[in-house]
Each structure stands twice: as structure tokens, then as C-alpha cells.
């Protein structure tokens, strides 16, 4: 099993969700996060005063998938989230030791 974590632009969340559903991915967790990478934030104007936004709002998706399906998820995220501009985000993939469905006690891929 793999855990796919994607940090994406908040306005691309619906596009990414639709692409994942079309790819047959059934479950995901979404968290609103703030952070910065190479872009180091940006500046905005409010009532004539310029101020720095150090932490840019992003959406973080977490998806646990079987080894066979995780590449489909990555492809769907890349296709839907990419704008070609700095700040599009990152995708992280890690190994999962196990998963357990609390309701039934199913384990491994059966719990997904």
C-alpha cells in the first residue's frame, strides 16, 4: 500500500477531486493548510497598505491506495492540478505498513 499526499492550490481542489473520482479513486482526506516553498509567499494590498503573506493557503489531500492504483492517482493529480506556474504544489508518496477498517476489522487492501 502507498500513501499519496498532495499539496495543491485551493482553487484546483474540485478539479483534482473530479479527476480522482474519474480514475476510480473512492476515498480521500482533505485538509486546509498554509505554507511556503520556493515562492516564499507574496505581497498583497489592503486599503492602500502593502503587506506580506508569508504562508500561502493550500489544500492537502491524503489518499491511501493499493500498489496497483497509486500511479493512476498521481497521474490524475498531475493533470488536474498543474497550471505551469510556481506554487502548483508537491506530491509525496510513502509506504504504508497496514490499514484497518474500524467497523469490520478488515485489514490491508480489503480495508481500503
Image: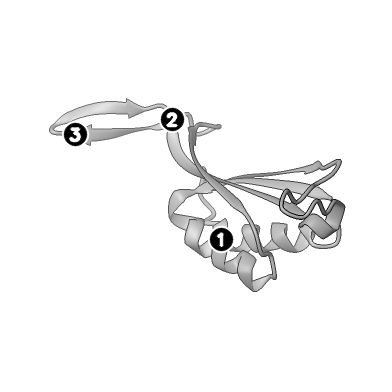
x, y (%) of residue 64? Answer: 73, 51
User: Residue drawn 43% across and 30% down?
Assistant: 55
- Upstream in the sequence, badge 1 or badge 3? 1
Left or right of residue 26, residue 101 in this image? right
Q: Which residue is mark 1?
A: 16
C-beta proximity under 8 Å, tags 1 and 3: no
Q: Residue furthest front?
A: 104
* Distance from the alpha carbon under mark 2 to that under mark 3: 17 Å
Label 3: few (<14), some or many (≥20) within 10 Å? few
Q: Which residue is mark 3?
A: 46
Q: What's the image's color scheme?
A: one colour
**SS class of the residue under badge 3?**
strand
Q: In the rendered image, is residue 66 in sight?
A: no
Label 2: few (<14), some or many (≥20) within 10 Å? some
- Upstream in the sequence, badge 2 or badge 1? 1
User: Residue drawn 48% across and 57% down?
Assistant: 12
Left or right of residue 79, residue 108 in this image? right
Q: Nearer the viewer, residue 81 or 5?
A: 5
C-beta proximity under 8 Å, tags 2 and 3: no
User: Residue drawn 22% across and 34% down?
Assistant: 45
Q: Quadrant of residue 65?
A: bottom right
Q: Residue 81 shows which numbered tag?
A: none
x, y (%) of residue 57? Answer: 43, 39
**SS class of the residue under badge 1?**
helix
- Upstream in the sequence, badge 2 or badge 3? 3
Q: Which residue is mark 2?
A: 55
User: Residue drawn 48% across and 62% down?
Assistant: 14
**SS class of the residue under badge 2?**
loop
x, y (%) of residue 77? Answer: 63, 58
Amino acid at each position: 500500500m502507498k500513501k499519496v499526499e498532495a499539496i495543491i492550490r485551493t482553487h484546483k481542489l474540485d478539479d483534482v477531486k473530479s479527476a480522482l473520482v474519474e480514475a476510480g479513486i473512492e476515498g480521500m482526506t482533505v485538509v486546509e493548510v498554509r505554507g511556503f516553498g520556493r515562492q516564499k509567499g507574496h505581497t498583497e494590498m489592503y486599503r492602500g497598505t502593502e503587506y506580506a503573506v508569508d504562508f500561502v493557503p493550500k489544500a492537502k489531500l491524503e489518499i491511501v491506495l493499493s500498489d496497483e492504483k497509486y500511479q493512476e492517482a498521481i497521474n490524475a493529480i498531475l493533470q488536474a492540478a498543474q497550471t505551469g506556474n510556481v506554487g502548483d504544489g508537491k506530491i509525496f508518496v510513502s509506504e504504508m505498513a497496514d490499514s484497518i477498517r474500524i467497523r469490520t476489522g478488515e485489514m490491508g487492501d480489503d480495508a481500503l
